[in-house]
Image: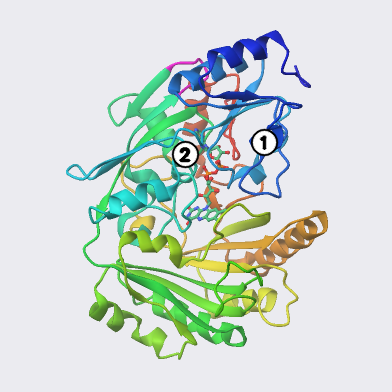
Amino acid sequence: MYGITSSAPEVRALKDELTGTVTVAGDAGWDDARAAWNLAIDQRPAVITEPETVADVVATVNFARERGLRVTAQGTGHGASALGSLQDTVLIKTHRMRVVGIDPECRLARAQAGAIWADIVAPASEHGLAPLAGSAHDVGVVGYTLGGGVGWLGRKHGLAANGVVAIQVVTADGRVRVVDADHEPDLFWALRGGGGSFGIVTAIEIELHPIDELCAGMLAFPWERAAEVLRAWREWTRTVPDEVTSLGRIMQIPPLPDIPEPLRGRSLAVIEVACLHGEAGTAELVAPLRALGPEIDTIAPMGPAGLLGVHMDPPGPVPGAGDGALLDELPGDAIDALVAAAGPGSGSPLVSVEVRHLGGALARSHESHGALAALEADFALYAVGMAPDADAIAAVNAHLDVVKGAVSEWHAGRRFLNFSERRGGDDMFAPAALRRLRAVKTLVDPDDMIRANHPIAPVD
Ligand SMILES: Cc1cc2nc3c(=O)[nH]c(=O)nc-3n(C[C@H](O)[C@H](O)[C@H](O)COP(=O)(O)OP(=O)(O)OC[C@H]3O[C@@H](n4cnc5c(N)ncnc54)[C@H](O)[C@@H]3O)c2cc1C
């Protein structure tokens, strides 16, 4: 089957059947079709489909199953680095299925599988509502949410996975199922935090949250002050209510033309804050941070759509390598170790080393929650560097190990799926959750046909 060509009768039949497109190596458009958002990833699947309908997804899954191929879904390719070789796999790129509906009365959004966060955030914002989106406008709603989803409203409203109301999914047998708390609750549970191993999601329905008041932005300091500023930020996180979600980071911003002048080419220590209060309440809360004397201060009132700009994520696809870790705690020694590994004089090639403050609703589990019921760690580390060629990939990966190793003493025993860009073992889930995930996988996909970047294997 590998090396399959456009003229193969089964490919011609699939092309005839699909409203969307089917692309194989050698076709015009092959390189565009196989590109992931992370341009460092060179993916070469057996076949690529770009479905436009649920029927296209069903036809693709049936095509793969009948030919002994595996199948995997990709919304954007932000999480493509952990996928591994796709030579025996049909890649379903969902980006043409981007219809989004907002129901302001019920405070719900329904999104097709290819929607990115900007597709929901903008129309929801018009009604004063917000989803539990992450930092970047173009991360896929489905991939992010299946992996848990930690965003700016996280400490107040929890993980995105636990704000899901229903999921439409095509399972390995080609059946279209709509799962929720009352219909196939085990599969619904597994999809909410267990990742993409259980089926090809075609649509997702999520809760929206009313946002009456919001201030957000960043405080930037010369990076020589990184240890002092991050230590002060860490002390401050002990005092804030759940309405405040924040992170501290060390940045070496590349001198790229589309980066605004005050930041372009700079090295900085940065604190980013989102606060569900008005200007006066926020000013009171962030006063201890402002007292540090930031060089840049952008914290200001904004609508929910503004949150997608706070973290300064890349505006479009880039080549990168990153990885993260959950940290049980972040004492001053841990901050010093991070600054020594990634701050001034470290020789670090990393663009950003950030630590997100967790806790609040992110740490509170409930029996209604999914496979990732809560993040049982106080902080999440994520570091990333630009990786345009093999040498850069090697240098960035080596330094990711240095940074993660510097704080290994404080690693929680578990990793967070969304901040893990390397293939890992079974340490994403508590043992009981992993056993249940594997049992669900065995029921819906005993032959392990559906692949995910962080796979759950069926029981042997
Ligand atoms: C710049 C950047 C910013 C980020 N910010 C945040 C953040 O603030 N918070 C956070 O929690 N994470 C964040 N992430 C991590 C991100 O949430 C994960 O990489 C996530 O997996 C991306 O989903 P995607 O659909 O965009 O990527 P993809 O690579 O398309 O998908 C990742 C995986 O999700 C699964 N998947 C995707 N679509 C489907 C589908 N239709 N059906 C079944 N499975 C599917 C597959 O297993 C796939 O391998 C960020 C990543 C980047 C690169």
The amino acid type, in three-letter code, at marker 2 is Ala
- x and y percentages locating residue 136 in the rendered image: 48, 56
Quadrant hosting residue 65: top right
Q: Earlier in the sequence, mark 2 or mark 1?
A: 1
Residue most toward the right? 391
Q: Is residue 60 above or below residue 396?
A: above
Neighbour tally class for label 1: few under 14, some 14-19, many 20 plus, Cα within 10 Å: many
Q: Secondary structure at mark 2?
A: helix
Under 8 Å from ligand 1: the CB of mark 2? no
Give the residue at mark 2: 433
Task: Indicate the secondary structure of the residue bearing disc 1.
Answer: helix
| Quadrant of res 54 | top left
Q: Residue at x 58, y 58 (%)?
A: 325
Residue 300 percent coordinates (x, y): 34, 76
Residue 379 point in image, percent of width and height:
49, 64
Q: Is residue 67 above or below residue 121?
A: above
Q: Is residue 385 magenta?
A: no
In the rendered image, residue 126, in percent from the top left (x then y), is placed at 26, 54
Q: What secondary structure characterizes most of the magenta part? A: loop
**Label 2 CA crowd tier, 10 Å (few <14, some 14–19, many 20+):** some
Residue 280 visible in this rendered orientation of the protein: yes
Q: Report the front residue among 304 and 256.
A: 256
Q: Is residue 202 left or right of residue 41?
A: left
Tell how many labels: 2
> Which residue corresponds to mark 1?
34
Mark sitting on residue 387? none
Residues in magenta? 170-175
Q: Amino acid at mark 1?
A: Arg
Residue 97's quadrant in the figure?
Answer: top left
Quarter the C terminus occupies:
top right
Q: Quadrant of the N terminus?
A: top right
Please say if 181 is above or below 68: below
